Amino acid sequence: MKRQLSLILAALLCLSILAAMVACDNGDKPADTTAAETDAPTEQVTEAPTTEETTEAPTEEPTTEEVTTNNTSAPVEGAINIGTAEELIAWANTIIEEGTDYFEVTVNFTSDIDLAGYNWIPIDGAFLDCVTFEGNGHTIKNMTIAGTDEPLEDAAHFYPYGFGFIQNAEYDLEFKNLNFDSVKIEAWERHVGVFVGNMYGNAWVTFENCHVSNVELNGWLDYTNQDPANGGHPISFRVAGFIGGVFAGTPEFTNCTVKNAKMSGFHNLAGFVGYDASGNVSADSFTNCHVENVEMTFSYCQSDSYTADMPRKFVSVFFNANDWVDNIDDFDESGNTFKDIYFIDYTDPDAVHTPEDFRSWTYEEAHP
């Protein structure tokens, strides 16, 4: 009996100790504290990335526009569709004003472009690499480039700045099914071409089904009055319908024409290429091309070194070669033709030459 009573008392003592321990734990924490602690992490997670902070953070990084107009970033690739003068000028300004590089891009013209009322600023081809201008048969009309006495020597190449749709071509370019009509360029100490002013580097520039018509290229003529203080301007030379001067690289023309053009300048005037210094241009560079109704007026006749046999050295139908030898006969074999071409002596407007005047001249005949 005593043993049973001792066991009961021991059991009651254990129960009382256990109850005291439970009461102690619950007494140190208010009942709602546990709920507060479990809610706290939820509150912090929802507040840290609030909607406002999430939308603001990315603005500290470059935007898409900043990336594509920064020439230290990757070049822009793909296709660009242009259908208005405003769109063309806006695209050109991404190069001229913002220095955007374009690589393997097709500039796709979706309609005719009328640049009347604008002064075109030539695009620097140093930002165009493997770019195709696909005209889709459309025409850029009324491109006007105003003359300026501002010294614009191309510091990278030590040649005069180029005037044309493209200032200087330094990388591969392709022009397809694109026309220029009613072009007026006034140039002082510039190389002038409707499509490209100058070619440099290892550029391969091709033209296919491209046409130039109704063109006035005024390269200033007064050899004896080049002083701006006396109302003169420095003269231009290397003036042509497509490219002013080729100093390196290779141009190629297929099914292209120059019609209804008047050009003036010191010397190196031609239908397609004013002057080839590279030696890469030949009759083989032209296939089924045509030059018609073009008048070229030169002022080299004012130079003390001028002689009567020299017009062949600085005017030609298709291009002026670096060896100064007449090349007209070479063009027949590739389907190239010309009609109504006139070379005019600035000092004697009545001294009009035609290509036929030069056809029998050879280097040996001119240098006995």
Image (cartoon, helix red, strand yellow):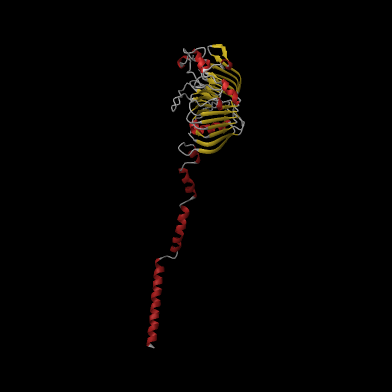
Residue 280 image position (x, y, % from top left): 51, 27
Q: Going 46% across and 56% down the picture, which residue do you hit?
A: 43
Along the horizontal axis of the image, is 112 left or right of 38?
right
* Residue closer to the observer: 317 or 77: 317
Residue 133: x and y, percent?
Answer: 56, 33
In the rendered image, the vertical position of residue 38 relative to residue 60, given as above or below: below
| Residue 4 as seen in the image, left or right of residue 360 | left
Residue at image x 55%, y 32%? 174
Image label count: 0
Q: Nearer the viewer, residue 245 or 154?
A: 245
Residue 338 at x, y percent in the picture: 60, 21
Specify whether residue 257 is in view.
Answer: no
* Pick the front one: 51 or 176: 176
Place residue 1 in its image quadrant.
Answer: bottom left
Q: Is residue 200 above or below residue 221?
A: below
Is residue 53 visible in this depiction of the protein? yes
Q: Is residue 105 above or below residue 267?
A: below
- Residue 46 locus on image (x, y percent): 48, 54
Toward the bottom, the furthest residue is 1
